[in-house]
Amino acid sequence: DGGITQSPKYLFRKEGQNVTLSCEQNLNHDAMYWYRQDPGQGLRLIYYSQIVNDFQKGDIAEGYSVSREKKESFPLTVTSAQKNPTAFYLCASSLGTWEGPMAKNIQYFGAGTRLSVL
Amino acid sequence: GDSVTQMEGPVTLSEEAFLTINCTYTATGYPSLFWYVQYPGEGLQLLLKATKADDKGSNKGFEATYRKETTSFHLEKGSVQVSDSAVYFCALTWGYQKVTFGTGTKLQVIP
């Protein structure tokens, strides 16, 4: 079945440590996204990528980094510079913008990774 | 900028009750509107969508009508079930812009 796989489901970070969250999709989608979800705040966009080897900052990119070396993969690194990393992280994908705006608009989400600080 | 405002939750209903979750939006263009649902411990799933004024999106007994005159996209269901307990997000996008999500409304249905 096609879909988006996030791993791990739960992750713990120690002080000063970088951690990487995995996101893989087999939907053949060009665009991928990372969101952070905090209670009562909805979803906030961290980074997005519309094509391989290209990505843009979202609304809250500070303390995070990403790469897009393969179409299927969009890993997110939470660096030690992110002082409040505890949250639920969601990865999503959609068809590329050149498929037309409506194709891009529908996003497909993974099951999420819950990150906590030790 | 674009924004989506949802009614505060949580909303607690008895099984078979009528559901309305209000959503209003502000956008500079002519947006497409969406409702996503998030079940406990999972990611979001698209529930329904509408792409232009007066369109009605529907799925699994849920409905929402795109009202341009009131800039609203309220979610309704005639008879909720315990399995509908989840968090519901209203969202919009237009052109090639990013998707803007509301803060979510938690629904709890009790038997």
Image: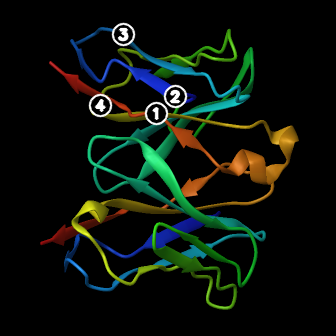
Q: Earlier in the sequence, mark 3 or mark 4?
A: 3
Within the image, what quadrant is residue A107 found in?
A: top right
Q: Which mark is residue A84?
A: 4
Q: CA distance from mark 2 to mark 3?
A: 23 Å
Report the residue at 72% width, 67% height from top.
B31
The one of B44 and A90 positioned closer to us in this rendering: B44
Kindly indicate whether the residues beneath marks 1 and 3 are on one polypeptide chain: yes
Q: CA distance from mark 1 to mark 2?
A: 5 Å
Subunit of label 3 = A
Q: Which mark is residue A18?
A: 3
Report the residue at 30% width, 57% height from top.
A40
Indicate whether A72 appears above or below B11: above
Q: Position of residue A74 (x, y in %)?
A: 58, 19
Kindly indicate whether the residues beneath marks 2 and 4 are on one polypeptide chain: yes
Q: Are marks 1 and 2 in contact (CB under 8 Å)?
A: yes
Q: Earlier in the sequence, mark 2 or mark 3?
A: 2
Q: CA distance from mark 3 to mark 4?
A: 13 Å
Q: Position of residue A116 (x, y in %)?
A: 22, 26
Q: Quadrant of the C terminus of chain B?
A: bottom left
Within the image, what quadrant is residue B86 found in?
A: bottom left
- The answer, for residue A56, to whether it is visible in the render is yes
Q: Earlier in the sequence, mark 1 or mark 2?
A: 2
Kindly indicate whether the residues beneath marks 1 and 4 are on one polypeptide chain: yes
Subunit of label 1 = A
| Amino acid type shown at disc 3 | Asn
Q: Earlier in the sequence, mark 1 or mark 3?
A: 3
Q: Does residue A102 appear left or right of residue A89 in this picture?
A: right
Crowd tier of the residue under label 4, counting other residues whose Cα lies within 10 Å: few below 14, some 14–19, many 20 or above: few
Per the image, label 1 sits on a secondary structure element best described as loop
Name the residue beneath numbered marker 1. Answer: A110
